[in-house]
């Protein structure tokens, strides 16, 4: 006997993860933590795509999730390179202190 989890539980979990990520982006001051929160939001979107793909029984959600993962990997690598460059030039990754790009 196979028990399947209803889609509403996946969607509630995705909404909670997205809200946690959004809260972290809005509240945190550290650029690395902000990037991790953006990744959490992207993973919540992936969970939604995959939930609807499972509900509909097609691969469209899987393809969308694959592209979101690729964008998240590119965002993480470029974002980390920018954070490292800013840290080397300014000595901090605090968003409040690096808000302007002036020297």
Image (cartoon, helix red, strand yellow):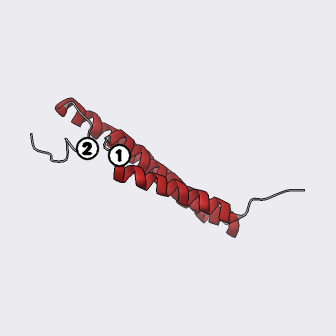
Q: Which residue is mark 2?
A: 95
SS for callout 1: loop
User: In the image, which is nearer the foreground, mark 2 or mark 1?
Assistant: 1
**Which residue sits furthest left?**
103
Estimate the x, y position of residue 1 in percent, counting from the top left.
90, 56
Q: Determine whether, in the image, residue 64 is placed left or right of residue 55.
A: left
Q: Residue at x 69, y 67 (%)?
A: 55
Q: CA distance from mark 2 to mark 1?
A: 9 Å
Estimate the x, y position of residue 58 in percent, counting from the top left.
67, 66
Q: Determine whether, in the image, residue 39 is placed left or right of residue 94.
A: right
SS for callout 2: loop
**Number of the label disc, if any, that sits on residue 28:** 1
Q: Are marks 2 and 1 in contact (CB under 8 Å)?
A: yes
Count of picture labels: 2
Q: Is residue 5 visible?
A: yes
Q: Residue at x 68, y 69 (%)?
A: 56
Name the residue nearer the viewer: 63 or 6.
6
Name the residue nearer the viewer: 29 or 86.
29
* Disc with the residue nearer the chain's start (2 vs 1): 1
Q: Residue at x 48, y 49 (%)?
A: 40
Name the residue nearer the viewer: 8 or 88.
8
Q: Is residue 2 above or below residue 39?
A: below
Q: Determine whether, in the image, residue 12 is placed left or right of residue 36.
A: right
How many neighbours does mark 1 have within 10 angstroms: few (below 14), some (14-19), or many (20 or more)? some
Q: Is residue 41 above or below residue 6?
A: above
């Amino acid at each position: 006997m196979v028990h399947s989890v209803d889609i509403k539980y996946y969607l509630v979990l995705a909404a909670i993860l997205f809200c946690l990520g959004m809260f972290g982006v809005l509240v945190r001051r550290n650029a690395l933590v902000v990037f991790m929160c953006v990744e959490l939001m992207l993973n919540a979107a992936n969970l939604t795509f995959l939930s609807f793909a499972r509900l509909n029984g097609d691969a469209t959600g899987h393809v969308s999730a694959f592209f979101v993962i690729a964008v998240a990997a590119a965002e993480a690598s470029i974002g980390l390179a920018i954070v490292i460059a800013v840290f080397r030039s300014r000595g901090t990754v605090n968003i409040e202190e690096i808000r302007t790009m002036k020297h």
